[in-house]
Structures are given as C-alpha cells and as structure tokens.
Image (cartoon, grey):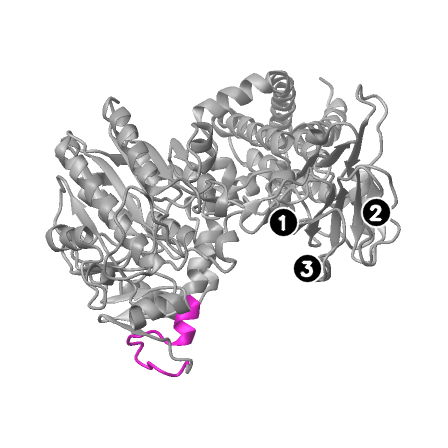
C-alpha cells in the first residue's frame, strides 16, 4: 500500500465514525421516540431524550477506545442488548397503560405478565432484535475505528458523554427504570421530607414503624397444622356494655365471654366509623378518613398496596370470606376487602339474590340470618383442603338499634337500643354455643371484637351517660391460640399482627402502628386515634402549645401529633394507587344516544364512570344529568361530581363552583336525552342528547365530542384527548406537565 493512501484511509475511517455513531443513536432512540409519540409528549422531550442517548453512545465510544478490542464482547454488546430491552419495555408499558416506568410496573411484574407481554409484542420484539443486530454491527465498526484515536480525544468524548447523559438523565428510560425500582424497593423514601427529629423519636419510642413493604412482597408460612380463624366485629359494642349498673343483665352472654375468654383487658378503638374500624384493624394503622365513609368509596385505591391481615393470610394460603349485613358497595368496603386477599365478600346485594331480604322496620340482612348464613359458610369452609378465614360484621346494634323476632326484649328498660343490645347478646351466645357444640373451635380460632364504640348522640348519653366516651373494645379469644398476651391492653390497630401470632404464622409483614400483643415491646402505654390519644389508661388531648414537652415526653403535643398523622397519611398515599391522570393519545370519552350502557370516561386508563359517589355509595351516572370531572394543570383528577337532570339545588351549585374554582379544567359529560341543564359560567354548551366537552377554567371549550368517520357504530360520539387537543390545552395553560413520567 502506498503511503499516500494511508492518510486518505484514516480520514475515511474518521468520517465513518459519525455515520456509524448516528446508526447506533438512532437505533437506541427508536423505542424511546415511539413511546414519547404515544404519550403525545412535547417536542422538547424528544430533543432531551435524543441528546441524552447521544451522550450515552459517545461515552461508550470513549471507553471503548481505551480498552482492548476483544473486551468489547464482555460488556459493550450485553450493555446494548440491555439498553434495547429496557427501552422496548418502556414502549410496551406506555402502549399498554399510558405510563412508563413507575413503581407499579414492578408491582405487576411477574412471569405471567412477562409471558403475556412477549405474546402480545412478538412482532415488536422481532423488529427490535433486527435493530439490535444493526446496532451491534455499527458498534463493532466503531470499536475498530475509535481505537486509533488519541487518548486526549477519547477523554474529551468521555467527558462530553457524561455531561450530555447526566444532564438529560431524567428523559432516559434507564434512569426512569432505576428511579422506579428505587421507589418500589424503598416505598417510604418520601418520608425524608417530614420532620426528621420527630419521626426518629416516634420510631425510637416504638410508636411508629416505617420499614414497610408492598403487600406483593410479603411472605408468610403457616404452621404444619394451621388453624382456621373467625373474626366477629360487633357493631358499636364496647366492653362497658357488659356490666352496666343502670341496666343490669343487659348483655349477660357478652359479660360471661369477657370474664372467661378476654385475651387482654381491652383494646382502645382506633376508628370512629365502621369502615375506619375495619381498615385500621386489618392494616395496623390510622388510615386518613378525613372524608368519613367516603374516604375509600370512590375507588381511588386508598392503601391498596399496604400489607394488611388479609394479604398475609393470603400469602399463607388461606381461603378468606367476609359476611356482612350491609351493602358491600357502601363506603367501598367490598372493594377494599377484595383488594386485600378476601376471596369472597358477601353483603346485602348477595343476600337479596339468595332471596334473603331486609326484615320490616330494619335495614340490611338481619343478624339472626347473618349468623345462620355464617354457620352454613363455615360448614362449606370446613370441607376445603386448606385453612380458612371468615370475618363477620353485625348490624343489629347500629343506631337506633334493631330487635328481631328470635329474641326476648330487655326486661329492665323500654329503650329501643337496649332491646337491640339484649337481642345481639342472645344471638351471640347461641352462635358461640353452636360453634362449640359442633367442634368447630377444636381447630379454629374465634376472635370477637368491635368496630367502634357507640356514637355519643343525645339518646346514647341519656342511656349511658359519660360511658359513651369509653372507647375500650373487647378482644375475646376462643379456641386453640398459639400465644398468650404479653400486655394487658392494646389498640384496634394491633389486631392484625396479634392475630397472626395467635395463628402461629411466620411472616415478614410490618405495620405502621400495629404491634403484636403477644410479644414484649418497648412501646409505651400510649395509643392513638384521629383526635385524642390514650396514655396510661386515660384519654388525653394533644396540647396545642407546641413548646410543651421540651424533652419530647408523652403525651404528644399538637405539633408532634400533626407530624405523626402527616407521616401516616403519606404512608397511606404511598401505598395507594396514583390518582387518575390524563394520558394524551390514550384517553377518551364515548357517548351514545341509543345505548346508555356504552358510556365510557377513560382518564389515566381508568373508566371514571364507575367512580362517582354520593353518600358513600356509587352513583349511576347513566341516568340523565351532568357527570363532571375536575382536573388540575397536570391533568390529574382532583374530584368528581354528578348533578341529576332537573332543578339544580343551591348546594349542588355551590359544590360545582367550589370544585371549579379549585381546578384548571373540567371534563363535562351530559348524559340526558334532551338539551343540557344550564351550569354557571358555562353557557355555550349546546347539544341535544349525550355529549361531552373539555372546558378550561374560564368555561371556554377546548374540545368536544364528535361522531368519528370510519367507525361502524355511527351513533357513537368520541371526545379524544389526542396530541392536538392536549397541545391546545398546553398552549392555554390548562395542561402543563408530562403524562409519561407520572
């Protein structure tokens, strides 16, 4: 070869470096750009992602030049394959759910989900494999060429690569994957934003545990001879009702059970309403019930991923059933239990299907019928090959109290609630006796407690005086318990860990507040509720002066209590489903003038049409009226409201105005057959029959539903939140942040 040809060849090789580098960058960027396009991301996202990917490639090339060529096989090619796999997975996640890598990605990651993904995206995988071959070929060519570059140039390439990649790392799928994994492995990292001194002190005192994991990560093993378990929640029955001086012999069976089988002296109620009592006892915490019974009724998934009693028993192989007399839809009770390991959840809806209706002058399934159905269910469960857990909730002592024909009235008083308590006592005594006589309790643990104490209304104060403020609840245990009590008192939120010890189950679940009462603990005699606390057996208030307790002694002052409740609220939110957030390019509203059942309001991949509530019960928005979803400037749903067709009340109008003032935009769906009823400041919403609009804070319409060409059903209208619509919203300041990184 002539010497004059060598510089020319060197020059040609150097010219080939940018070309091959561009091939590698384009190949790696392809899945990311497709994902960004699916999510209708703004142009700057594409640019940042492309620059960051270029930085990664330049960094790899710089490192390649410093090493031996054969070493490429040891790290470069596997690294390229890994990058392609992560980016293709991100594309699949966005295509499937509208969201990229989040902690939920890892929560749902399993062999089965992987198999389904491979089956669903087999064509995309084949194309990705071909692209990967091209990338590896180009990188092989680059490896030969960069080895001839000077160390100074290679060092500059490494520096430039680090700057570009680190500067745009938030747009890199690999960084998002890492962040999501961190969130999954350490779900409570967000607690670092709380007051560290108070948090540390609460942990040191044994009042708080933040070493929690997702319910999917919990492992549990039953003993060689596992025991079954029945948990009975008595409605509004505190231990003071067992021995009332003004009302002798009011609940003799309950009193006898307390004297003979009280496992601890009492547990302090951790809830004020039924669903709160269930949630806190099952999950070992104080869930945020600031909206009362509606707090989990809207399907937002409050504490769905928090490990609760049902989740641990499910991991231990238990079959679980819940029987209640009330509707399972009320307060979101049925959904909550189903999300936490219960295989069967039966309420009034089910009993009606079985021909069991409410008795005259009562509501729900009567307690005599509930106890009878529980015995039938126990008989079926006993025939199953694996251990089982049955929970029941009575309703007879729900205010104002209900009396049934199977009972004798209370002879020493004429109040309705006294008759109800006396009746419940008779039913309870007969039920426990039957469990004992049939031998169920030979291998089954029976735990009797209550959801909360009686409400302090005027009638209860007349009957029980200051006793209405006695928040001590029973914890009665019959059957073959595997442990004895180590303390004399606890709280409702101690039920789950205590019950697991009573069953002898080996598990790794932890609870924010709950501690097993069968184990010695450094926790002081201090128990919490949303409002006041209990210290050394007495109710205490949290002093409003935050300078009280300079040595951080108990009771907690107002600031310490607020900080604790804030931490518990953050824990609940961290283990909840993220709020529905608009996914541009995926979400839509579908209406039909002939088929009311075809109504869909898809936001964040969730059908919002089933998540409207009123009075803690779901609302059927397919009846004529306004279904309104209020969004903030990130596209996140902050509230929902349904206004039936007809004369709109002042209360409804005020609620609409308050929600509208707190939101940046509204999705408005008229479900009636005629012209829409007028709403304040929204006068240009004219249509006939079902229709949908997206309006900004001023009431101006951004987009509305239309009949789309190309669909077989020409009767259907669609409001699609596509790139053009979301772009218009961003231009008007209605939508400001990415939906891909939510």
Mark 2 touching mark 3, by CB under 8 A?
Answer: no
**Which mark's residue is nearer the viewer, 2 or 3?**
3
Residue 306's x, y, as percent? 40, 46
Residue highlighted by disc 3? 655
Q: How far apart are marks 3 and 1 (CA)?
A: 51 Å
- Which numbered disc, 1 or 2, marks the residue that appears first in the sequence? 1
Left or right of 163: which side holds 644? right
Please identify the quarter of the rendering in which residue 455 is found. bottom left
From the top left corner, tell me how far across and down residue 367 is, in percent: 33, 42
Q: As drawn, is 488 to the left or to the right of 549?
A: left
Residue that carries the numbered disc 1 in the rendered image: 163
Residue 702 is tagged as 2
Local crowd size for mark 1, using a 10 Å CA cut-off: few (<14), some (14–19), many (≥20): some
Verify whether residue 548 appears in magenta.
yes
Question: Looking at the image, which is closer to me, 666 or 116?
Answer: 666
Would residue 395 be visible to someone looking at this image? yes
- Magenta-drawn stretch, dominant element (helix, strand or loop): loop
Badge 2 crowding class, 10 Å Cα cut-off, few under 14, some 14 to 19, many 20 or more, is some
Q: Is residue 196 visible?
A: no
The part of the chain drawn in magenta is 546-563
**In terms of depth relative to the viewer, which is nearer, 732 or 184?**
732
Examine the rendered structure and indicate whether residue 534 appears above or below residue 724: below
Splitting the image into 4 quarters, where does residue 128 fall? Answer: top right
Name which residue lies at 69% across and 54% down: 632
Location of residue 434 in the rendering, given as x and y in whole percent from the top left corner: 18, 35
Question: Disc 2 or 3, which lies upstream in sequence?
Answer: 3
Q: The residue tagged with tag 2: helix, strand or loop?
A: strand
């Amino acid at each position: 070869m002539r010497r004059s040809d060598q510089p020319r060849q060197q020059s040609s090789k150097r010219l080939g470096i940018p070309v091959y580098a561009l091939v590698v960058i384009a190949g790696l960027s392809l899945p990311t750009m497709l994902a960004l396009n699916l999510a209708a991301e703004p142009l700057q996202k594409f640019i940042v992602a492309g620059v960051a990917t270029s930085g990664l490639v330049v960094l790899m090339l710089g490192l390649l030049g410093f090493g031996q060529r054969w070493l490429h096989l040891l790290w470069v090619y596997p690294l390229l394959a890994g990058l392609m796999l992560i980016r293709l997975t991100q594309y699949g996640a966005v295509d499937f759910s509208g969201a990229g890598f989040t902690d939920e990605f890892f929560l749902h990651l399993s062999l089965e989900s992987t198999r389904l993904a491979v089956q669903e995206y087999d064509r995309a995988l084949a194309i990705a494999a071909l692209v990967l071959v091209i990338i590896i070929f180009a990188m092989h060519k680059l490896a030969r060429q960069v080895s001839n570059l000077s160390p100074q140039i290679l060092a500059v390439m490494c520096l430039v690569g680090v700057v570009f990649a680190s500067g745009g790392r938030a747009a890199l799928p690999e960084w998002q994957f890492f962040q999501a994994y961190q969130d999954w492995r350490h779900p409570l990292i967000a607690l670092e934003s709380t007051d560290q001194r108070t948090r540390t002190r609460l942990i040191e005192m044994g009042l708080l545990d933040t070493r929690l994991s997702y319910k999917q990560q919990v492992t549990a093993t039953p003993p060689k001879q596992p025991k079954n378990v029945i948990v009975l929640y008595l409605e509004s029955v505190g231990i003071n009702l067992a021995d009332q001086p003004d009302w002798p012999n009011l609940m003799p069976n309950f009193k006898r059970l307390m004297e003979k089988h009280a496992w601890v002296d009492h547990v302090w109620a951790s809830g004020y309403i039924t669903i709160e009592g269930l949630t806190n006892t099952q999950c070992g915490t104080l869930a945020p019930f600031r909206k009362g019974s509606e707090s989990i009724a809207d399907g937002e998934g409050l504490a769905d991923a928090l490990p609760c009693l049902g989740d641990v028993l499910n991991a231990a192989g238990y079959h679980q059933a819940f029987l209640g007399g009330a509707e399972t839809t009320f307060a979101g009770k049925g959904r909550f239990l189903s999300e936490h390991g219960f295989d069967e959840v039966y309420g009034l809806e089910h009993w009606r299907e079985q021909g069991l209706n409410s008795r005259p002058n009562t509501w729900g399934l009567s307690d005599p019928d509930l106890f009878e159905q529980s015995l039938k269910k126990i008989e079926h469960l006993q025939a199953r090959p694996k251990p089982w857990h049955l929970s029941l909730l009575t309703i007879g002592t729900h205010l104002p109290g209900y009396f049934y024909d199977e009972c004798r009235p209370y002879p020493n008083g004429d109040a309705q609630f006294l008759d109800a308590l006396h009746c419940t006592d008779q039913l309870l005594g007969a039920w426990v006796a039957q469990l004992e006589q049939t031998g169920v309790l030979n291998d089954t643990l029976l735990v009797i407690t209550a959801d909360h104490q009686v409400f302090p209304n005027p009638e209860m104060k007349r009957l029980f005086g200051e006793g209405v403020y006695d928040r001590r609840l029973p914890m009665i245990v019959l059957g073959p318990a595997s442990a004895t009590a180590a303390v004399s008192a606890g709280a409702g939120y101690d039920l789950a860990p205590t019950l697991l010890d009573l069953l002898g189950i080996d598990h790794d679940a932890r609870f924010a507040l709950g501690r097993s009462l069968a184990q010695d603990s450094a926790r002081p005699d201090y128990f919490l509720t949303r409002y006041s606390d209990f210290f050394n057996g007495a109710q205490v208030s949290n002093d409003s002066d935050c300078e009280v307790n300079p040595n951080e002694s108990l009771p907690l002052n107002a600031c310490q209590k607020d900080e604790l409740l804030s931490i518990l609220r953050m824990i609940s939110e961290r283990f909840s489903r993220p709020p529905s957030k608009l996914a541009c390019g995926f979400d839509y509203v579908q209406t039909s003038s002939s088929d009311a059942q075809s109504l869909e309001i898809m936001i964040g991949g969730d059908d919002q049409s089933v998540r409207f509530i009123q009075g803690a019960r779901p609302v059927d928005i397919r009846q004529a009226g306004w279904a309104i979803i209020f969004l903030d400037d990130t596209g996140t749903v902050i509230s929902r409201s349904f206004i039936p067709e007809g004369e709109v009340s002042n209360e409804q109008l005020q609620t609409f105005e308050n929600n509208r003032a707190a939101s940046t935009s509204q999705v408005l769906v008229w479900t009636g057959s005629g012209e829409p009823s007028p709403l304040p400041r929204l006068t240009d919403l004219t249509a006939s029959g079902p229709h949908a609009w997206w309006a900004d804070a001023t009431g101006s319409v951004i987009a509305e539903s239309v009949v789309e060409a190309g669909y077989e059903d020409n009767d259907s209208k669609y409001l699609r939140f596509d790139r053009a619509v979301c772009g218009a919203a961003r231009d008007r300041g209605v939508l400001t942040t990415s939906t891909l990184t939510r």
